Image: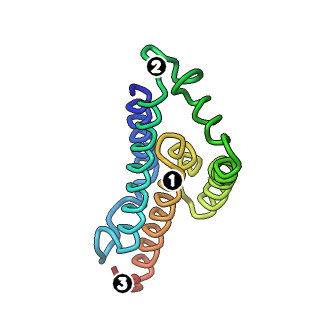
Amino acid sequence: MISLIVHLVLGIAVIAWIVRANPQIFARPAGGPTFSAMEIALYVIGVASIGLGYYFNHQFVAEYAVAGGNPFWGPGSWQQFIVLGYDNPAAASASQDYTIINVILLPLFTIWDGRRRGINRPWLFFVSSLFTSCAFAYAFYFAVVERQHRHQEAARGLSSIPA
């Protein structure tokens, strides 16, 4: 269970790092609500994915881990978690898809798109996925893009998409 707590703490730390690296984006947009409806929806989806992930990860650790076990290999470890993800063809199909999305597409997209948009340290969204969830990392990134868009609209004097 300690490994789950460590993941939680590291996840919060990486999220805080992203926010601190981008104060201009996380400032309240001028002339609008603190959060748009889209930002709220993305954050709710992202947080729900973390809750579900931690629920199932807790079940995995409670069922498989042994007292004094190693979190990297052996019963209840990351190594066993990965092996079980490929335990049958259905699980393997989902696991390979998730692995490609999380380990290749998420960093490729967020780094390329984030640099283009002027988001500082966009690679941290991938790092956050290692401690939160892939769905959270994408939802968080898309919420940041939405917020940045709202700042740009406010700077141009345009009305934002309805909150």
The quarter of the image holding the N terminus is top left
Of the residues shown, which amino acid type is indicated by label 1? Ala
Whether residue 91 is situated above or below residue 37 in the rendered picture:
above
Q: At 44% across and 54% down in the image, what residue appears?
A: 49
Label 3, residues with CA under 10 Å away: few <14, some 14-19, many ≥20: few
Circle 1 packing at 10 Å, graded few (<14), some (14-19), many (20+), is many
Where is residue 157 drawn, in percent x and y?
Answer: 40, 83
Residue that carries the numbered disc 1 in the rendered image: 137
Q: Nearer the viewer, mark 2 or mark 3?
A: 2
Front disc: 2 or 1: 2
Which mark, residue 54? none
Instruction: State the residue at coordinates (43%, 57%).
Output: 46
> Tag 2, which secondary structure?
loop
Residue 86 position within the rendered picture, expressed as x and y whole percent measured from the top left: 67, 42
Residue drawn where x is 60% and y is 30% of the image: 80
Q: CA distance from mark 2 to mark 1?
A: 30 Å
Q: Which mark is residue 66?
A: 2
**Dot 3 and dot 1 residues touching (CB under 8 Å):** no
**Residue denoted by label 3:** 162
Query: Element type at marker 1?
Result: helix
The amino acid pointed to by label 2 is Val
Q: Earlier in the sequence, mark 3 or mark 1?
A: 1
Q: Nearer the viewer, residue 70 or 46?
A: 70
**Image coordinates for residue 22, horizontal then vertical, percent:** 45, 53
How far is the residue under mark 3 from the one under mark 1? 24 Å
Closer-to-camera residue (149/62): 62
Q: On the image, which quarter does residue 55 sit in?
A: top left
* Mark in the foreground, 3 or 1: 1
When the figure is inspected, residue 122 is found, relative to residue 151, above or below; the finding is: above
